[in-house]
């Protein structure tokens, strides 16, 4: 049996603000921020525990609180290379009215070749970038275990 290890939720904060414009008292001030970046892994819904077998589906979700939320964009990377939606790697952004600031990466039919570092980059148009990444590793000692084992936030 292949396992997903340490699945769960990680919450971390990042704030990126461009300079606030200096001007007359009645001028409009500008502030953007990205904060409270979170990753969570949705284990296989057909299993009673956190184990997922090769051949099943894994969902990696990334949620970021952003102001203004309508200017939030996401990109996904695997080992530093841009990912595009395909039959097996499905990238979606959730409805802003249901779950604002959330993007999902669904890996369908999990394979050993899916090991690597998956990175979600959230950014605001004209603003700073928050980088949240998670490693998806295949254990080289057994060749059977799949593990999620690192959460980090870079700003």
Image (cartoon, rainbow, N blue to C red):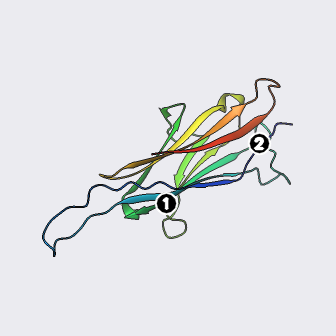
Compared with 10, 114 (above or below) is: above
* Quadrant in which the C terminus is drawn: top left
Determine whether the residue tagged by mark 2 lies in a helix, strand or loop.
loop
Left or right: residue 9 versus residue 93 is: right
Q: Give residue 115's position: percent from left, percent from top.
A: 66, 31
Query: Which residue reaches farthest left?
Result: 24
Label 1 crowd (10 A; few <14 / some 14-19 / many >=20): many
Any mark on residue 4, and which? 2
Label 2 crowd (10 A; few <14 / some 14-19 / many >=20): many
* CB atoms of marks 2 and 1 within 8 Å: no
Left or right: residue 121 versus residue 32 is: right
Q: Give residue 106's position: percent from left, percent from top.
A: 62, 46
Q: Residue at x 54, y 65 (%)?
A: 99
Q: Nearer the viewer, residue 80 or 45?
A: 80
Determine whether the residue tagged by mark 1 lies in a helix, strand or loop.
loop
Q: Residue at x 25, y 61 (%)?
A: 20
Left or right: residue 114 versus residue 31 is: right
* Quadrant in which the N terminus is drawn: top right
Q: Residue at x 79, y 43 (%)?
A: 52
Ranked by sequence position, the earlier of labels 2 and 1 is 2
Q: Residue at x 43, y 61 (%)?
A: 66
Q: Give residue 96's position: percent from left, percent from top.
A: 48, 66
Q: Give residue 123's position: percent from left, percent from top.
A: 40, 50
Left or right: residue 128 versus residue 92 is: left
Determine which residue is flagged by label 1: 101
Image quadrant where residue 144 sits = top right
In this rendering, the count of numbered labels is 2
Compared with 105, 24 (above or below) is: below
Q: Is residue 109 visible?
A: no
């Amino acid at each position: 049996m292949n396992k997903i290890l340490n699945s769960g939720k990680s919450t971390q904060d990042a704030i990126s603000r461009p300079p606030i414009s200096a001007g007359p008292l009645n001028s409009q001030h500008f502030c953007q921020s990205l904060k409270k970046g979170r990753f969570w892994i949705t284990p296989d819904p057909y299993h009673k525990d956190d184990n997922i077998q090769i051949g099943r589906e894994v969902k990696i979700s990334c949620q970021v609180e952003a102001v203004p939320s309508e200017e939030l964009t996401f990109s996904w990377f695997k080992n530093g290379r841009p990912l595009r939606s395909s039959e097996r790697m499905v990238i979606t952004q959730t409805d802003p009215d249901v779950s604002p600031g959330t993007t999902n990466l669904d890996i369908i039919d999990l394979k050993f070749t899916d090991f690597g570092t998956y990175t979600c980059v959230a950014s605001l148009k004209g603003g700073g970038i928050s980088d949240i990444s998670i490693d998806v590793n295949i254990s080289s000692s057994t060749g059977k275990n799949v593990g999620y084992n690192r959460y980090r936030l870079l700003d």
